[in-house]
Image (tube, rainbow, N blue to C red):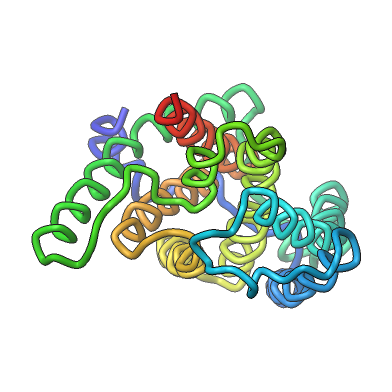
Amino acid sequence: MLIWIIRARKHTLKHAAGGLAPCEAPIAFLLFLAVFFASAGAILVKQLLFGTESIAESQPETISLAEQDKIQLSMHLCQLPFMLFFAWLVHHPKAFLSPASRALSARRFSPPRTFKFGVLTLLCVLPVVILSQTVMELLWQVFGLGPVSRLAHETLKSLVEAPHDRWMALSMFLAAIIAPIFEETIYRGLLQGGLRRMGFTAWPAILFTSVVFTSAHITAIPPYALIAIFTLSLGFGWVFERTGRLVSSIIMHALFNVLNLVLALTLRG
């Protein structure tokens, strides 16, 4: 499929369905910023729900799976009102779109075709992601910058180190279902879609969004894994633009996370 995409010049996205936000660009950007400011309230919500114990009392590398889950739950609760508003916009596109903007609405793929594109795009992008990760790991070791791990994300490491933790099921649910929905809504639906509404062409919007997406993961993954995350994000942005449906990148993101969870469980033995 990757060869077909290149030979048919589908990567140019000149005739793509279009990944557009369901509202005008200023509203999309305000929602994007609001989500980030709301996330800052996660610590307060965590203290209200689970007590006042602070993660500052322990070293970052020793944060338990339970502590990670509490932080993630609190953050998603803070973001939830904006996610619901976005969902409402998707089903009421005329509410915050001018007549001219409505004429630019995406030509969306059918649900079956959208699902197929999400799966096939992951199969095409995954080898490139693995290759970029392998090259960066080799360079990291050649230059003596430190050890590398097959599990780059902190949550995956915690799953391996705490095989009988009662929070494991919740961690897997958050990683496989909740995180893809929230992250794709924020980055592809609001940021990339808002840039497209603003007049950016497809690839500049995808590239800028991928830079922001990768930057947001700096605290969760080591530096040598950032190129792989950036590459993966390009795939998310491409499939959203190609299908015109956010669910395509959500499916792709969720399947990637599930594959990583399977790898973590395999290493756990």
74 to the left or right of 142: right
Residue at point 77%, 71% (across, down): 43
Kindly give the residue lying farthest to the front in the view shown.
Answer: 57
* Quarter the C terminus occupies: top left
* Quarter the N terminus occupies: top left
Residue at point 75%, 62% (across, down): 75
- Residue 55 quadrant: bottom right
145 to the left or right of 55: left
Residue 83 versus residue 133: which sits nearer the camera?
133
Asked if residue 266 is positioned above or below residue 165 in the image, the reply reads above
- Residue 267 quadrant: top left
252 to the left or right of 168: left
Residue 190 appearing in the image: yes
- Residue 97 quadrant: bottom right
Residue 116 versus residue 244: which sits nearer the camera?
116
Tally of marks: 0
Residue 183 at x, y = what percent? 63, 54
Residue 173 at x, y = what percent? 68, 36
Residue 208 versus residue 56: which sits nearer the camera?
56
Residue at point 66%, 27% (across, down): 111
Residue 198 versus residue 54: which sits nearer the camera?
54
Asked if residue 252 is positioned above or below residue 213 in the image, the reply reads above
Kindly give the residue lying farthest to the left in the view shown.
Answer: 142
Residue at point 35%, 51% (across, down): 12
Residue 142 at x, y = what percent? 9, 60
Residue 46 at x, y = what percent? 81, 64
Asked if residue 83 is positioned above or below residue 245 in the image, the reply reads below
Residue 13 appearing in the image: no
